[in-house]
Amino acid sequence: MMIGKVFLVGAGPGDPDLITRKGLKLIQTADVVVFDRLIPLELLDEARGDAEFINVGKAPTRHRLDQESINEVIVNRALQGNQVVRLKGGDPLVFGRGSEEALACHQAGVPFEIVPGISSSYAVPAYAGIPLTHRHLSSAFTVIAGHEDPAKDEVSIHYEAVARMGGTIVILMGVSKLSDVLNRLIQAGLDPNTPAAMIEWGTTPFQRVVEGTVTSLPQRAAEAAIMSPATTVIGEVVRLRTLGTQWFDALAVASANPSR
């Protein structure tokens, strides 16, 4: 039997129209689609009628399968001769553990390709009307994880360097640890009055945005019951949203209320 192939495909940040053409074509021809919790489910409708679907989605506090088991699933399906699309939210290599799955394929002798996706780190702020860079305000941005592997002996993020960098800070996977991360940044020298925003379910009709400062954002997010998935943006660029760069809010309301 010939060995199949694994395609590690980024599904984008939530809006199904934001997947790449290559990613969509691969879904349409796949024998097996192994998908995450946060992928746009509309994309599964693009697959063949006889395709096998395997849900390996991970919620923040519960996992259907651990990462080793997911690696086994994609490798074993490929060894059976299948074209396997491993569909991952955002980009496979931006906090997506795609590199671990690529290594598992390599070690098993399974050919693979990585198909980049649009990352929520910049797409979600864009849908909230928050640019990561803006002349005179921000010439750089930093993306950090709000939740690290608990098995690590120590925190690997250099918060002092992040705070001193200037520009815009984006925090992914940071809902449950928001207060802790922001306090670390303040202790590292970040101005507590820096504008900040949290965007829930960004790029989808369910998008919600909460604004405040580094100090006030945790309380405001809690009052609004912001849940995962959410992206946090910190920096002067957040102010531009109320100055006229927001565009998606009205579209989302219209989509949720088509009679209007």
Image: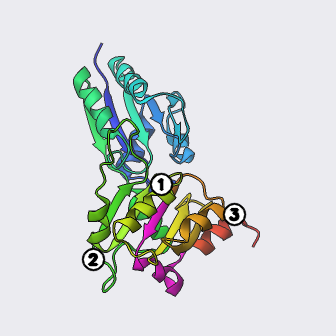
Residue 127 appears left or right of 76: right
Q: Position of residue 91 (x, y in %)?
A: 37, 50
Up-down relation of residue 229 to residue 48 (above or below): below
Q: Describe the element under mark 3 as helix, strand or loop.
A: helix
Question: What's drawn in magenta, residue-wise?
Answer: 231-247
> Is 252 situated left or right of 50 in this image?
right
Is residue 125 shown above or below 35? below
Residue drawn at the location 44% of the way across and 67% of the way down: 233
The amino acid at mark 1 is Gly
- Which x, y percent locates residue 1? 30, 12
Residue under label 2: 139
Residue 129 in view of the camera: yes
Mark 2 lies on a secondary structure that is: loop
- In the image, residue 58 lies at what x, y percent? 51, 37
In which quarter of the view is residue 85 placed?
top left
Q: Decide which of tag 2 and tag 1 comes sooner along the chain.
A: 2
What residue is pinned by disc 3?
Answer: 256
The CA distance from mark 3 to mark 1 is 26 Å
Farthest top residue in view: 1
Q: Which residue is mark 1?
A: 174
Considering the numbered disc 1 on the image, is that residue within a helix, a strand or a loop? Answer: loop
Q: Quadrant of the C terminus?
A: bottom right
Compared with residue 108, is residue 185 higher up or lower down, i.e. above or below?
below
How packed is label 2: few (under 14 Cα within 10 Å), some, or many (20 or more)? few
- Which residue type does callout 2 highlight? Ser
| The magenta stretch spans residue 117 | no
